[in-house]
Image (cartoon, helix red, strand yellow):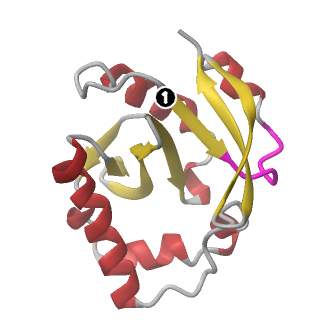
Amino acid sequence: MAFTLHPFSDIPTEDWMSLLNHPDVIRHMPLADGHWTRDAAADWAKGKDAQWLERGYGPWSIRVESQFAGWGGFQREGDEADLALVLLPAYWGHGAEMFRGFMNRRAELGIGAVSILLPPSRSRTRGLARLGFALDGELTYEGQRFLKFRALG
């Protein structure tokens, strides 16, 4: 499966709203409520693109065979980069390849330590070990509990 990475601004706001309001997606996003308006989704996407200017890295929108699939990439979390991936359900199962692609870019982006934060509802985490991540504890962010995984090596 070939995927391409793009600025968030390349994706129509309606596509962002479909992802951000999708009930199967938000079930695993405790900080989201599934009630995104057009303006809120557009502002959110602008904020994701702005991370590139502020930090020199950030997340990308993802297309698979030119179809919008979701978003992923690195975001600043404390002193390290948090690797996030949020896909439409039709693309679930393709995350490992995308994670490897992101991790292969970390050196060129000047990224050292990498973590992944997952809500406890994401009970299937064994694949993270195959990708080089180990459980590193728990944390609370905006009142919600997350499991923290850290890249080994």
Identify the residue at horizontal 44%, vertical 35% (top origin): 79
Measured as percent of width and height from the top left, residue 118 is found at 68, 47
Closer to us: 140 or 116: 140
Measured as percent of width and height from the top left, residue 116 is found at 59, 38
Instruction: Bin the neighbour count of mark 1 within 10 Å (Cα to Cα): few under 14, some 14-19, many 20 and up.
Output: many
Against 44, is 29 above or below?
above
Against 12, is 66 above or below?
above
Residue 106 image-quadrant placement: top left
> Is residue 49 located in the magenta-colored stretch of the structure?
no
Against 18, is 109 above or below?
above
Q: Of helix, strand and loop, which one carries label 1?
A: strand
Residue furthest to the front = 79
Residue furthest to the top = 153
Measured as percent of width and height from the top left, residue 41 is found at 39, 79
Identify the residue at horizontal 83%, vertical 44% (top origin): 123
Amino acid beneath label 1: Val
Q: Is residue 112 left or right of residue 96?
A: left
Q: Is residue 19 left or right of residue 145?
A: left
Measured as percent of width and height from the top left, residue 137 is found at 76, 34
Closer to us: 8 or 108: 108
Q: Which residues are magenta?
A: 118-124
Identify the residue at horizontal 58%, vertical 56% (top origin): 90
Against 116, is 30 above or below?
below
Closer to us: 100 or 54: 54
Closer to us: 109 or 93: 109
In the picture of the structure, the residue carrying the numbered disc 1 is: 114
